[in-house]
Image (cartoon, coloured by chain):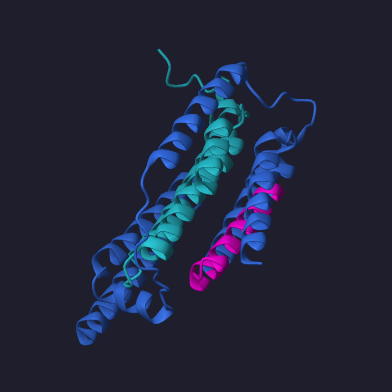
Amino acid sequence: MAEITFFFIALCVCAFALLSVLSRDVFHCAVWLALTLLSVAGVYFYLDAEFLGVVQVLVYVGGIITLFVFAIKLTAKIGDKTIVQVNEQTLAAVIVTAVLFYLLFKVIAVHPWVSGSAAVVSLKDIGNSLLTGYALPFEFISLILLAAMVGAIVIGKVKKCFHWIILLCWARFYSVSGSLAFSRAAM
Amino acid sequence: MLGAILFCIGIFGVLTRRNVIGVLISIELILNAANINLVAFNRYLGTPDGLGQIFAIFVIAIAAIASVVGLVLIIAIYRNGKSVFLDHFNLMKW
């Protein structure tokens, strides 16, 4: 039963990914990408990673797809169906992809897989690791997020954006001092 | 295996798309393939502290950042040049 479920989810992932790559209308591409990401969330649920599945649905399907749809609608010319969407190197791309897939398949088939300890990770373990052992990369990710927000505002040229940038930086340093104090208390 | 298939589809999309948004969509597919591999190896071969899932969370955050910055750049370029096709971007060519 579990095998059948996995094959069904994998088939969904591959079919939706192919459709999102090959579809001609860019808006359709975004919709197929949303279905692909939902199927990948299904793979996470199958692999007992419930938290990651929920994060996938929230961040990707909730946030990134919305951004894609906004960008497609804001750059209105590409919604036109008469425009050719692929470039002239399709044949070369097919050859390169086939060779790459053959090599990957060869490696997977040849490699002797050791079956280690099957480990189901609980949400509590993830939270503990994130705030103790991996606190530094966690904070670094938040710094990159801040840089991306400031960069997006500056590139998008919002008028009088300076106050917002100051506010974002202030909120970020406030939160980092709080979470560092928390992780020190947890250690 | 599934990760390899998804990765190859993403590479194919990056190589063939003429449109910047299509290339970004393909890059999202590639990052998802990496995430599937991380979670699967963590589930069947991994350690109980969940290193694979933590790295998958980091990869999701980086993917979100990358797509946000990429889309803002696309909109800025579209405002200047009125085009979103890769072969029209010869701004940085000599």
Q: Is the stretch drawn in magenta largely helix, strand or loop?
A: helix
For image coordinates 59% across by 26% down, the residue present is B16
Quarter of the picture holding the C terminus of chain A: bottom left
Q: Residue furthest top?
A: B94
Q: Position of residue A88 (x, y in %)?
A: 62, 16
Who's the residue at 68% across and 56% down the image? A8
* Residues shaded magenta: A31-54
**Viewport quadrant of the N terminus of chain A:** bottom right
Q: Is residue A167 above or below residue B15?
A: below
Is B23 drawn above or below residue A184 in the view shown?
above
Magenta span includes A43: yes
Q: Is residue B2 above or below residue B61?
A: above
- The image position of residue A146, as x and y in percent, is 37, 59
| Front residue of this view, candidates B48 and A93 | B48
Q: Residue pushed farthest right?
A: A82
Question: In the rendering, at what x and y percent does residue A83 appear?
Answer: 74, 25
Image quadrant in which you'd find residue A89: top right
In the figure, is residue A83 to the left or right of B94? right
Residue A184 in the magenta stretch? The answer is no
Question: Which residue appears at 54% of the width and 48% of the height?
Answer: B2
Q: Nearer the viewer, residue A23 or A66?
A: A23
- Which residue is found at the position 51% from the left and 23% from the top? A96
Q: Quadrant of residue A72?
A: top right
Q: Colour of chain B?
A: cyan
Report the number of discs: 0
Q: From this viewpoint, is residue A133 visible?
A: yes
* Residue B52, visible in the rendered structure: no
User: Which chain is blue in the picture?
Assistant: A
In the displayed structure image, the side of residue A162 where residue A12 appears, left or right: right
Q: Position of residue B37 (x, y in %)?
A: 45, 53
